[in-house]
Image (cartoon, rainbow, N blue to C red):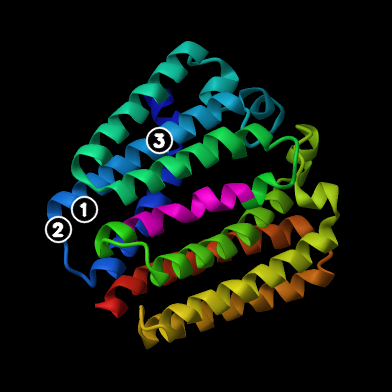
């Protein structure tokens, strides 16, 4: 059973559900419709798990070549391809049963859009094009938006700002991962920006995305979706992240700096989503 548990990438599920909850509370201003919230929570959990299973299946050969992924169940052959596909399919059907029956059209549509982008586009072009990263960031940005839409009942300006903020966070976060594991990506012949366009250009991209991340986070307060506590947290954490990214321009150890950027990206986003719902009530 542990292999099937690892197949759904529990760390990714936890992180996405955390942002989903914060997004829901932001959209609903703290008012919780227990039935809708529960259905959205478990429906999204199942569809993310399904997407991760299919992603693991598509990545199984590349995973065998990379140090950090070579022990994944499909890479080691601990789970058969057929069983993995059946498992992913059951999760997908379960998720849609929950979302269609007990949420609303917008929530179900966005969840399936995220699944399609992640599995049908990102996973398939990941090894071939640097465009996989921005495409993947769209799917990664959707969970808090889905929570927000479930809570607010509409896809309004707040949903779009939240989406833009998450895309701008996803990009430098993923670039930090690529720098941390650049040798692995090169070994697996995966087209990522540092390998295709160079590390310096990647660092410039990271700085620009973090600036955009700060701007979109501030926009949530400017348009009265969040309060000053959120804005202050965004400016402090995002500002420190920006300083760290600028310092990295002249870094002599890109792997070490990539690790620092990766860790700080997680601290920043968790801090923002931790204060977001309370500041919006």
Residue 37 circle label:
1
Q: Which residue is mark 2?
A: 33
Tag 2 or tag 3, which sits nearer the N-term?
2
For the record, the magenta segment spans 135-148
> Badge 1: few (under 14), some or many (20 or more) residues near its Cα, within 10 Å?
many
Give the image location of residue 75, x and y in percent: 59, 22
Q: Secondary structure at mark 1?
A: helix
Question: In the figure, 135 relative to 53: above or below?
Answer: below
Residue found at x 43% / y 78%: 220
- Distance from label 3 to label 1 (Cα)? 18 Å
Residue 258 in view: yes
- Distance from label 3 to label 2 (Cα)? 24 Å
Question: In the figure, 39 relative to 2: above or below?
Answer: below
Residue found at x 67% / y 78%: 243
Dominant SS type (magenta): helix
Residue 253 in view: no
**Occupied quadrant, residue 47:** top left
Would you say the residues marked 2 and 1 are in contact, meaning their CB atoms lie under 8 Å apart? yes
Position of 271 compared to 265: left or right? left
**Occupied quadrant, residue 98:** top left
Residue found at x 81% / y 70%: 249
Screen quadrant of the N terminus: top left
Position of 78 compared to 106: left or right? right
Q: Say whether residue 140 is magenta.
A: yes
Q: Which residue is mark 3?
A: 49
Give the image location of residue 39, x and y in percent: 21, 45
């Amino acid at each position: 059973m542990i292999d099937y548990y690892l197949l759904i990438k529990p760390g990714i599920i936890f992180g996405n559900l955390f942002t989903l909850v914060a997004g829901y509370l932001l959209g609903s201003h703290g008012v919780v419709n227990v039935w809708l919230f529960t259905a959205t929570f478990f429906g999204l959990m199942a569809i993310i798990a399904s997407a991760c299973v299919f992603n693991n299946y598509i990545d199984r050969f590349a995973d065998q070549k990379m140090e950090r992924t070579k022990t994944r169940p499909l890479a080691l052959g601990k789970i058969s391809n057929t069983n993995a596909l059946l498992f992913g399919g059951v999760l997908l059907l379960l998720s849609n049963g929950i979302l269609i029956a007990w949420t609303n059209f917008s929530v179900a549509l966005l969840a399936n859009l995220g699944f399609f982008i992640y599995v049908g586009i990102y996973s398939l072009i990941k090894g071939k094009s640097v465009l996989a990263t921005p495409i993947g960031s769209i799917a990664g940005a959707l969970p808090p938006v889905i929570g927000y839409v479930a809570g607010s009942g509409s896809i309004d300006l707040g949903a779009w700002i939240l989406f833009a903020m998450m895309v701008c966070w996803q990009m430098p976060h993923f670039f930090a991962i690529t720098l941390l594991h650049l040798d692995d990506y090169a070994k697996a012949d995966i087209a990522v920006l540092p390998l295709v366009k160079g590390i310096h250009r990647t660092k410039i991209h990271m700085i620009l995305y973090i600036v955009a991340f700060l701007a979109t986070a501030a926009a949530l307060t400017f348009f009265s979706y969040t309060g000053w506590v959120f804005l202050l947290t965004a400016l402090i954490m995002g500002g420190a992240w920006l300083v760290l990214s600028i310092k990295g321009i002249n870094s002599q150890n890109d792997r070490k700096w990539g690790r620092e950027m990766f860790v700080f990206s997680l601290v920043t986003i968790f801090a923002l989503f931790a204060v977001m719902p309370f500041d919006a009530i």
